[in-house]
Image: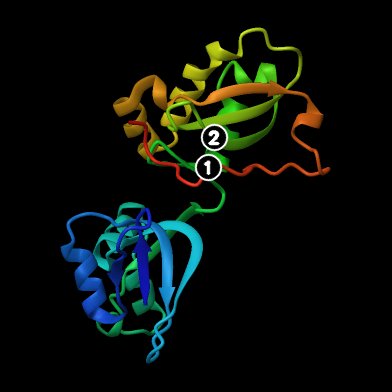
Amino acid sequence: MLHVNRCSTAPAGVGGGDEGASRVRDAGELQEGELVVTKARPIPLIRFRSGDLGYLVACDEMLARFRAAGIDPLEELRRRGGDPAKAATLPFILVHGRSDGGVVFSGANILVGQVRDALENDPPFPDLFTGSFQLRLDQDDNLDPVLKIYLEEKEPVQDAAALSAPLARALARRSKEYAISLDLFGEKAHPVIIPVGRDGLMPGGKIRYVQGGPPSAKAPR
């Protein structure tokens, strides 16, 4: 069985078989979060956190997506001698990232890949920074979470604070969750940019993209 763990709340379970597919189809919305797998066996019931971020799509909806792209899986099955009437109608699993490849800030998942893509493609960051970075969660004096992004600079950056808003907008274009948080919390959801040299990112000889953090990464008050 597969479940979607949404921010450590009660998992939205989706079991195997037609019943599970029906529950996804009737949910009316896609359940997105960390994929959790439960082995179909008696007690003890053990769930394994996969660390993969993704969501479930009902079989009918996924087949419609294939047909819109010019592919008919059931027709292909028939062409190969199979019987479409006997095809399973289990939901599809779409995986798009890792839960341990980023941080949760202001109630939103910010993935390492999203930060990397913004730094490599959105001006003015490619001209100012090498693309190497590190994410660190901290807290301000009010104990609200602060996301610090240490960026390896090519040349000394004079006004790093002015780059906070552009980077926030770049991340919002890549993360719907973060876009909502940015709209709700404004500047409180902005990352803090800290330019550093190479030694500031590689104390152990290898860059760790995510470094430590406070016990809680709740949204700002």
- Residue at x 28% of width, y 75% of height: 89
Residue 184, located in which quarter of the rendered image?
top left
The total of numbered circles placed on residues is 2
Q: Is residue 30 at all visible to an observer of this figure?
A: yes
Q: Is residue 173 at all visible to an observer of this figure?
A: no
Residue 25, located in which quarter of the rendered image?
bottom left
Q: Secondary structure at mark 1?
A: loop
Give the percent coordinates (x, y) of residue 109.
44, 43
Pick the front one: 1 or 49: 49
Q: Is residue 95 left or right of residue 30?
A: right
- Residue at x 37% of width, y 41% of height: 107
Labels 1 and 2 touching (C-beta < 8 A): yes
Give the percent coordinates (x, y) of residue 18.
24, 79
The vertical placement of 120 against 14, above or below, is above
Query: Circle 2 sits on which residue?
Result: 138
Residue 195, located in which quarter of the rendered image?
top right
- Residue at x 56% of width, y 34% of height: 115
Q: Report, in whole angstroms, how far the alpha carbon at label 1 lies from the one at label 2.
A: 6 Å
Q: Amino acid at mark 1?
A: Pro
Q: Which mark is residue 204?
A: none
Pick the front one: 163 or 221: 221
Pick the front one: 92 or 69: 92
Q: Which mark is residue 214?
A: 1
User: Reading the chain from its start, which is encountered first: label 1 or label 2?
Assistant: 2
